[in-house]
Image (cartoon, rainbow, N blue to C red):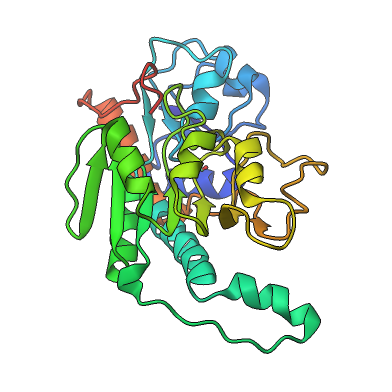
Amino acid sequence: MKIVVHIDDAAQWQAAIEKALPQATVLTSDAPAEARANADYLAVWKAPAHLLQEQAQLKGIINLGAGVDHLLKTPGLPSDVPVVKLRDAGMGELMADYTLYGVLHFYRSMDRYAQQQPNAEWQPHQVPEKSHWPIGILGLGAIGSLVATHLSQAGFPVLGWSRSAKQISGVECFHGDAGLDGLLSQVQCVVTILPDTAETHGILNAKRLAKLPQGACVINPGRGSLIDEQALLDSLGKDRKPGHLRGALLDVFCEEPLPANNPLWQHPRVIVTPHMAGPTPLSDAIDQVISYLRAFEAGEELATVNPDAGY
Ligand code: GLV
């Protein structure tokens, strides 16, 4: 079995796969083209098009991340090769940590203290009761549901929204368009963890942002396309004084890296992080990768990505 790996730390993945499957030939994508050709499997994150185009006998593709938007848009992706993606695989906990950081940032008024400090302004702010500070999670897949559960365990009322109805203990679940509007009108903070699909594109548009209560905040560790960036800027208002929205913690953007002239960089109430909320931790993810490879080889049924749905 020949596997070609493409991800930032590919050599480490190569070594980990070789260790688990000593009989396999595992190459990184910078191997010579003749060596890379005729692979049985690709294990990839943001693969270049040529890597897909040069393969003639692939049996499966493993997406080494949660979102398949990049892979599905890559020219040359064969339509007859099954694609599987990592589900949670340690990313959920990292995303939960990132989200909790953002929630506490706003809940404990760290944004306000950051603005006060340059003026030596000693002004404590009241800590609201957690029960009065509900959080909305848009997207209740493997990662979203774990993030929702973590926040609920941290003591916040958590409202979750998904396309179809779900049930998660400790989370008040909503679905459908009406459910989304109902959720938004109740939360102090909205967190977007949906996949990037035609249906989720701009799901937080001007109309929906306006449904959030005055002074709410936004955390986006999911995908940039979920939020209309101009509408977000408009609802944040221009200067240090909150507009309709109080602030935002954003990890993902319509264009990445976020261009230097994008006003989000300069906005005093926006924190920009460079798509680092949920990297794929090799030590947690390797078992899932190996079990996918074994299941492919054994001809077992796998939960594959549905390219039409986009996840
Ligand atoms: C990261 O963005 C991922 O989708 O895994």
Quarter of the figure that contains the C terminus: top left
Residue 69: x and y in percent read 50, 28
Residue farthest along the right direction in this orientation: 261
Residue at the image point whose x is 17% and y is 57% from the top: 169
Question: In the image, 268: left or right of 201?
Answer: right
Q: Position of residue 247 (x, y in %)?
A: 59, 58
Where residue 271 appears, x then y in whole percent?
A: 65, 58
Identify which residue, 184 or 266, lies in the foreground.
184
Residue name at image x 68 percent, y 89 percent:
122
Q: Is residue 205 visible?
A: no
Answer with left or right where residue 159 lies relative to residue 247: left
Quadrant of the rendered image containing residue 70? top right
From the top left corner, tell me how far across and down residue 112 is, in percent: 63, 73
Q: Determine whether 56 is above or below 89 in the image.
A: above
Q: Outermost residue, bottom direction? A: 122
| Residue at 78 percent of width and 40 percent of height | 259
Q: Quadrant for residue 249, please give it.
A: bottom right
Image quarter in which the N terminus is found: top left
The relative height of residue 117 versus residue 94 in the rendered view (above or below) is: below
Q: Is residue 145 or residue 4 the one in the foreground? A: 145
Q: Is residue 197 visible?
A: yes
Q: Is residue 210 left or right of residue 161?
A: right
How many labels, in total? 0
**Residue sitting at x 52%, y 57%:** 217
